[in-house]
Amino acid sequence: MSGDREDLTQRVGYQLKRVDAALRSAMDAALRPHGLTTPQYACLELLDRQPGLSNAELARGAFVTRQSMNVVLHNLQDAGLVVRPATAPQGRALPTTLTVEGRRRLHAARADILAIEDKMAGHLSPSQAAHLLDELDRMATALQSL
């Protein structure tokens, strides 16, 4: 092996993926006692902020495919955490809303997820956190044009 090869662990993309994997693992573990998966939690958070979102809107917000979101929604509906009408009020989109139990479960899980984020980024000052968020947004925007 040549000594002039670049250390991939010093690349931004590698470190972002490392953080992503660690965050997902921590979230999965924290959500398990609440009977939720990370995509289910993301879906509940989105619906708490914007009731009535469609499957496609939820999929975009949770970073999953529409097909995967359909499975997530069916599982949440079977668990009594969300409701969707049998037929679309207009068009084809079925607006989804949280049930009382869905809101209760979300609020209980949210505390555990916020604790993970605090552990991950708690060492950052408010200005450092704002700068990091701005830079991450710029990176995502740069990649959207590819």
Image (tube, rainbow, N blue to C red):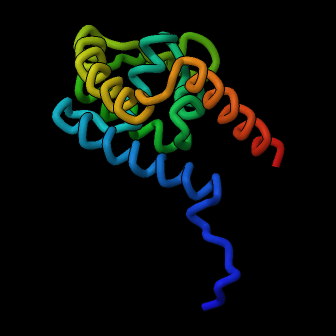
Quarter of the picture containing the N terminus is: bottom right
Quadrant of residue 38 in the image?
A: top left
Taking the view exactly as shown, the residue that stands out farthest to the bottom is 1
Residue 96, given in percent of the width and then of the height, sits at: 45, 17
Q: Is residue 145 above or below residue 53?
A: below
Residue 119, given in percent of the width and then of the height, sits at: 35, 32
Residue 87, given in percent of the width and then of the height, sits at: 48, 18
Q: Is residue 83 left or right of residue 131?
A: left
Q: Looking at the image, which residue is at 23% across and 18% down?
A: 108
Q: Looking at the image, which residue is at 54% across and 34% down?
A: 59
Q: Is residue 70 above or below residue 20?
A: above
How many numbered marks are there?
Answer: 0
Q: Is residue 95 left or right of residue 30?
A: right
Residue 72, given in percent of the width and then of the height, sits at: 39, 36
Q: Is residue 90 left or right of residue 41?
A: right
Q: Nearer the viewer, residue 9 or 24?
A: 9
Q: Is residue 131 left or right of residue 49?
A: right
Q: Nearer the viewer, residue 123 or 94?
A: 123
Taking the view exactly as shown, the residue that stands out farthest to the right is 145
Q: Is residue 77 above or below residue 30?
A: above
Q: Looking at the image, which residue is at 21% across and 38% down?
A: 32
Q: Nearer the viewer, residue 36 or 125?
A: 125
Q: Is residue 1 above or below residue 84?
A: below
Q: Looking at the image, which residue is at 55% across and 10% down?
A: 89
Taking the view exactly as shown, the residue that stands out farthest to the left is 33
Quadrant of residue 84 in the image?
A: top left
Quadrant of residue 107 in the image?
A: top left
